[in-house]
Image (cartoon, helix red, strand yellow):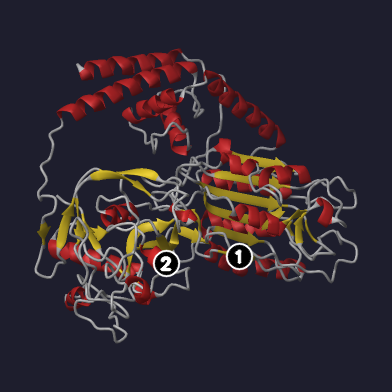
Amino acid sequence: MVETSRAFVLNLFLTALAAATVLVSVVQPAWAAGDNPHGVAVIIGNRDYQNKRVPAVAYAHRDAEAFRRYVLDVLGFDPNRVFDVRDATQAQLFTWFGNRDSHEGRLWRYLHPRYGSDVVVFYSGHGVPGLKDRRGYLLPADAEPDTPEINGYPIDLLYANLGKLREAKTVRVFLDACFSGDSDRGMLVRSASPVFVQASLPEATDGKLTVLSAASGSEVASWDERARHGIFTHHLLDALYGEGDLDGDGQVTAREAKAYLDDTMTIAARVEFGRYQNASLNGRSGAVLARAGSGGEFPPRPTLGKDEAGTVGGAKTEALTSVLVETAESVEAALDLTFEQRLLVQLGLSSLGPDVGRVDGIFGTRTRSAISAIQREKGFTETGHLTAELAEALVALGKAARAERRRAAEVRPTAKPTRKVGEKFQDCAECPEMVVVPSGSYEMGSPSREKGRDADEGPVHRVTIERPFGVGVYEVTFSDWAACRRDGGCSRNFGDRGWGRGDRPVIDVRWADAQEYVRWLSRKSGKRYRLLSESEWEYAARAGTGTRYSWGQDIGVNRANCRNEECGDGFRHTAPVGSFRANQWGVHDMLGNVYEWTEDCWNANYFGAPGDGSAWLSGNCDGLRVIRGGAWFSHGPALRVTNRSKCGRDAPRCDYSAIGFRVAKTLD
């Protein structure tokens, strides 16, 4: 019966496609590195200035077009969330990025409040110094260059406002401009030659802001006449389309892009113009700017036409393509699909085979590619957008697919757990002792009214752990680590700083060391060991309670190992594991003793955090990972079950003497 219904709906779908007359033809991106439906990009090309004394930036529009293609082709942003602003005025810059009183400009409106958004800002145009305040300014198209303090846009204000975007997971800024007051066509600001500026980043950016700019404060940003681009943009795009992958790991970091520019752009400026031009990098140098596709290949960099507009085939092709894109989008927009219908469209596409990514009602790159794939497979014109007939057929398919899933769920046998909740076990003689914690749901994080709460502890959100899992009864000890060393599974040998070894928690552990241990443990036992996800960690630390600590609202006395005058525990440094009473689920030392690594990348808040107990593997994955629980030197509030910390390669102030880890196990 199910197969008969499915065949009927599929025939309906094919009939609808055959009857549909598609009036538009849209060139879709041939390749996308990944689906990033929540990403937001603002691409600015300031070529033509209203003040006749300000020379045009000849290739700024081409720079903007080429960078727009990078955001679509390499980063996989939704085209509807990539905003191309040509010859931006001061009012437009304030509208997009905010002013001194508020950072909540138009860019802020497009950030996803739940999942968070990756943000890209690109600017090609003039920059000038302020003669009075010695600040750097982006020069709007309607500005008077001698008075940027009045009618420019301060670069430090841009950085500050971008740093305040709490819903932004990452912020990448690319500036093809200089701030010396000079240009290839002469001085912009009279008597500005002695005024050089170098804008710095604000301190409170949560490590998510990365800025690459074309030149230092005393240098001129040059053009490449042959490439018809700014020399910075030209070489930067080469890097971002794969040339900058210097270590061959399939990704280009900001550090690698800067090194590539040093080897190419800087030399080209010296050879072609006889001048210095050195790119500047500020912020998180480990930020990933580009990744290869699933096949390990970067997409080819598109070749733009020789016209000023910068599209393949010239200005006529650009105008025609623009009309066709707008027509395809307008046809779909006129359907005015409800959120439920958009979900069903994605389910219908999935039932036919294509990967739509997350079924969330948002038509990102993968959903668009799936629509194109179905159109291509059936021999129809590829638009990547829905017609009324196609939408109707996919909604019907989606309903059938959902009904089939529900029927399958009703008859699916329930697997009996191999171990009981509360049971303690060891998978091998040298394996850590584990305990089974129950499945369940809880509210992760702390509300804004919570005393001592940090901004990164919200928003509060529901997490559901669907299956019991194993948690180490104790933190991994020096004895545990020694077993791994003897077996050849762990490479580093840690000192104990004179505090004792044996059953004390191993310290000075990096995240990579903890990963090495769980890989060895998995091989040794033939079972799947890992680190806890951050949400699993808080779930196990709470042990079914809703209080600040698993034992109550107050830190108490001799409940955990922390700063002695607050915990009264009698230990000056680390304590032997199990020195304090276990929580309600039989787990010791979740709070205090040493911080514990989790699997998760660092994110500055819980917007977009998983709700199923899985690790959050997007965000600041290259430099920072989440640590939890507080340590022997921590004040009492740091031991709260909701308190979060971070550590890693880009956090030099981490005290590794206070960091260890605990293992988890996925049960059969």
List x then y, in percent, for residue 478. 22, 77
Does label 2 or label 1 sit earlier along the sequence?
A: 1
Task: Specify the quadrant that holds the N terminus.
Answer: top left
Q: CA distance from mark 2 to mark 1?
A: 20 Å
Q: Residue at x 66, y 70 (%)?
A: 267
Q: How many marks?
A: 2
Q: Residue at x 33, y 21 (%)?
A: 399
User: Which class describes the residues within 10 Å of circle 2: few (<14), some (14-19), or many (20+)?
Assistant: many
The quarter of the displayed image where residue 499 is located: bottom left
Going by the numbered disc 2, the residue's amino acid type is Cys
Residue underneath mark 1: 282
List x then y, in percent, for residue 119. 56, 49
Secondary structure of the residue carrying tag 1 is: strand
Going by the numbered disc 1, the residue's amino acid type is Asn
Res 647 label? 2
List x then y, in percent, for residue 590. 27, 63
User: Which class describes the residues within 10 Å of circle 1: few (<14), some (14-19), or many (20+)?
Assistant: some
In this view, 231 is above or below 369: below
The answer to whether the residue labelled 2 contacts the one labelled 1, judged by CB atoms less than 8 Å apart, is no
Q: Is residue 221 left or right of residue 486?
A: right
Q: Is residue 471 left or right of residue 283?
A: left
Looking at the image, can residue 307 be seen? no
Q: Is residue 502 left or right of residue 381?
A: left
Question: Who is closer to the viewer here, 237 or 627?
Answer: 627
Secondary structure of the residue carrying tag 2 is: strand
Question: Who is closer to the viewer here, 527 or 463?
Answer: 463
Of circles 2 and 1, the one toward us is 2
Q: Is residue 325 left or right of residue 627?
A: right
Looking at the image, can residue 128 be seen? yes
List x then y, in percent, for residue 41. 59, 45
